[in-house]
Amino acid sequence: MVEPEEELVEELPAWSLSAGAVERIDAQWPERVTREWAWAGATGAGLRVCIVDSGIERDHPLVGEVQEAVAVSVGEDGEAVVVEDTEGDLCGHGTACAGIVRSFAPDCQLTSARVLGAGFTGSGDVLLAGLRWAIEQGFDLVNMSLSTTKRRFATELHELADAAYFRRMTIVASAHNMPVESYPWRFSSVVSVASHDDDDPFVFYANPTPPVEFFARGVDVSVAWLAGESIRATGNSFATPHLTGICALIRSKHPELTPVQLKNVLYLTASNVGGQP
Amino acid sequence: MSEDLRAAVAAGVLGSEVAYRSLLQSIVEVARAIFSARASSIFLLDEETDELVFEAVAGEGAEELVGTRLPSSTGIAGWTLVTRQPLVLDDVQKDPRFSREAAGRTGYVPKGLMAVPLLVEEQALGVLQVLDRPQRSRFSLQEMDLLGLFASQAAIALQLLRSARRASAVLAGSGDDVGVVARLAAALDALEGERREAGLSLLRDLDRVLGP
């Protein structure tokens, strides 16, 4: 596999590449990318995943240990306030997402960034602050089963998504199945996910006609919920952590992959491309 | 024209809040019917208090719920509003907080619910919920699409109600200078035939006298 050393990234100017330098960016790709190659034997070990959502319930049997939980809010001066979160989950949804990711990657590290609970007014600013915090922390994967329709946030969200991309972080975001413009799922620097109705959690499809790039399991899914319970749920917001979980497996086995390479591996192992059904 | 005068004219011709409430009620009745559900409701975001308010309810809890308030960013309805993502949940009675709150309001605890945000362009106005559709078959992607289409219609109705309320509120707080314009606009809007033409002619004359 490619070994894009940090030094190399530092050394090369961003705007040019001389013919003599080509040998320095030697890259390799396996002859055939299969699911076996991509994630067989992987457990998510070493991968840091952040769930930006409603919080995660502590000690839920389907989630297990949550390594870190923070609550994000925005003070009157507009500054982000990030404190340890003792509230748990204010809805159940974040716990559901965490449980789905852990069902794929039992050994991954989970962080909860709660961006809900401080009221609807100002929730867009809190969403931005939460994503910015997650990027500063350098998580490998950020699961965002949420979106905003406010255009004034689009530019800043776009910059954050690109910043994550260039820091080798992958944001996996829920697509919208309603006729409105929303973000950040429409940005090409994130992995966007909508639902299919197959029961197999490892079935996912690459969409030949984006903006939605992938379809993952999102109908009638048994998910972790409040009070240690589980319920059945449907929605793109549950399809998203399925793909986050698969990304966690791939990245834990191949930590060197950049976001564009990860997206390629997802494409090549999708059920309608090279993956087994 | 000032914002107040504009609102006054709008209030005169927009139609009454009663008419829009009937439209919302009709929407929840139809939502309940097409999903064969036990109940359906629409919440409107109250921006002043940052709360969700039950505006229209069909089926179980219809009488008790209208006017009841919920937090705008917690619970299932709050999550739907903030994230702009529709959700379909079954077995929600296992969620102790949800069950306790639902039972406290109506004594009725649903088993399943669909919640979808009501969006008009970039605004999130509220949430549509459909409770306890029949469990005979699993939820389908087609139903999700139907829910989304239906929510678009409900959102437009909610936007009209909100505009009418804002216009009325401006009118109520603006004294009789503006009120007379609203009454004139409403009266003119109601006229027909020759009387309408005569009214318009009078206003045109007035415009020539008072206009720039």
Image: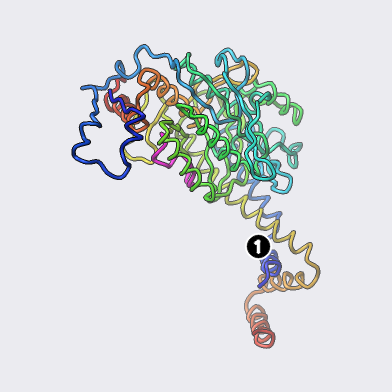
Q: Which of these two is toward me, A181 or A16?
A: A16
From the top left corner, tell me how far across and down residue A235 is, in percent.
50, 31
Residue at left offset 51%, top offset 41% = B148
Q: Which of these two is toward me, A22 or B19?
A: A22
From the top left corner, tell me how far across and down residue B165 is, in percent.
70, 56
Examine the image and state in which quarter residue A189 appears: top left
Left or right: where B121 falls relative to A2: right
Q: Which type of secondary structure does the marked residue at label 1 adopt?
A: loop
In this picture, which residue range is highlighted in magenta?
Answer: A177-191
Left or right: where B41 falls relative to A271: right
Residue at left offset 63%, top offset 43% = B126
Q: Which of these two is toward me, B37 or B174?
A: B174
Query: Which secondary structure dominates the residues rendered in magenta?
Result: loop
From the top left corner, tell me how far across and down residue B18 is, in percent.
71, 54
Total marks drawn?
A: 1
Examine the image and state in which quarter residue A95 appears: top right
Left or right: where B2 falls relative to A40: right
In the image, is residue A259 part of the stretch drawn in magenta? no
Examine the image and state in which quarter residue B160 appears: bottom right
Q: Mark 1, chain letter? A: B
Residue at left offset 61%, top offset 30% = A114
**Residue ID for mark 1:** B14
- Image quadrant in which the C terminus of chain A is located: top left
- Image quadrant in which the N terminus of chain A is located: top left
Tell me which amino acid carries mark 1. Leu
